[in-house]
Image (spheres, rainbow, N blue to C red):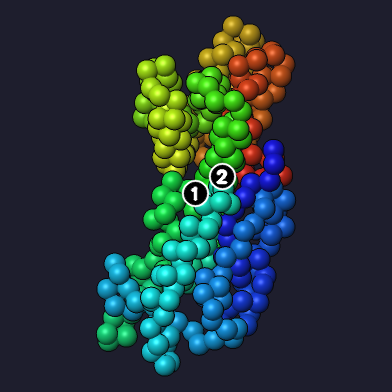
Amino acid sequence: MEKIKLGISTCLLGENVRYDGGHKLDRFLTDTLGQYVEYVPVCPEVECGLPIPRESMHLEGNPDSPRLVTIRTKQDMTDRMVQWARNRVSALVKEDLCGFIFKSDSPSSGMERVKVYNEKGMPVKRGVGMFASIFMEHFPLLPVEDEGRLHDPNLRENFIERIFTLKRWRQALTKKESRGIVVDFHTKHKLLILSHSPRHYQTMGKLVAKARDLPLKELYQKYQTLLMESLYLKTSPKKNTNVLQHLMGYFKEQLSSDEKKELLEVIDHYRKGYIPLVVPITLVNHYVRKYDQPYLKEQIYLHPHPLELQLRNHV
Ligand code: SF4
């Protein structure tokens, strides 16, 4: 797979662009995820023309429509930032990004729970950074996260699954236009979708079954929207157990009674939280190879991202 293009807050790459001349290098993003990703750095404060170092800013006023104001001299930077951000997101359309990683807590780049100060100087953590807000409004279905949330293994896994899937979808769309693209993509992603949302699994199955009834562009657009909505929903041990049992159905005839017992035991241990998901998945993959299951070999659920990212490894 080609590298996945992701937008990122520039300071997370170790660039000295922060108000104090420092950076916020995140080694997981640069050294580990960076092997699979081509980053498009964006520093709203520097790119809108502010110097390094500069006076620090915060959000103030109404948390739903805050102003961006320098803390000491009270200069209002809102209009400057909004105008720059609108132009920047329009330019980013060309980059074909599969997602964005924001710097948490920043009044420009934070994607959620950013402090907004009222007239008494008291903060509420309800704001969104000014650039992040305009970006998310412009690209409502693109996966976004901040580096703080990516330390949570479940959120990290979910974000990475979404960016890899969106990249595969975009690559599929580079082939000659046809309904077959959607049918083929859906066949391979069925179990991944089921692990996130049984409801979307049903709806998308119906959409694909009636693919001929829709104009092609509309089919692509509807499918992509449902795909991104489904993967946004978190997997859970209950949903994964359902998928694993579903997978086991394909081996019913071939597994020996010992193999069946072992697999059921491993799935049950995963469901109870004793072992991580990677254990039953590894065992299923072993049987897929052993019994040469062509349909399951193609299932992205069994290998949605590179092993080196060490996901599905937590309980
Ligand atoms: S948080 Fe955003 S605005 Fe602040 S230095 Fe980092 S990239 Fe620039």
Q: Please determine whether, in this image, residue 67 is positioned above or below residue 3.
A: below
Left or right: 184, with 110 as reference point: right
Residue 175 in the image: x percent, y percent? 61, 28
Q: Please determine whether, in this image, residue 245 is positioned above or below residue 164.
A: above
Tag 1: residue type?
A: Pro
Residue 279 in the image: x percent, y percent? 63, 34
Residues 161 and 222: in front is: 222
Q: CA distance from mark 1 to mark 2?
A: 7 Å
Residue at the disc numbered 1: 143
Pointers 1 and 2 in contact (C-beta within 8 Å): yes
Tag 2: residue type?
A: Ile
Residue 255 in the image: x percent, y percent? 63, 12
Residues 145 and 273: in front is: 145
Q: Quadrant of the C terminus?
A: top right
Question: What is the residue that sits farthest to the top in this orientation?
Answer: 253
- Tell me if mark 1 has few (under 14), some (14-19) or many (20+) residues whose alpha carbon lies within 10 angstroms of its own: many
Residue at the disc numbered 2: 163
Left or right: 266, with 237 as reference point: right
Judged from the image, the secondary structure of the residue bearing numbered disc 2 is: helix
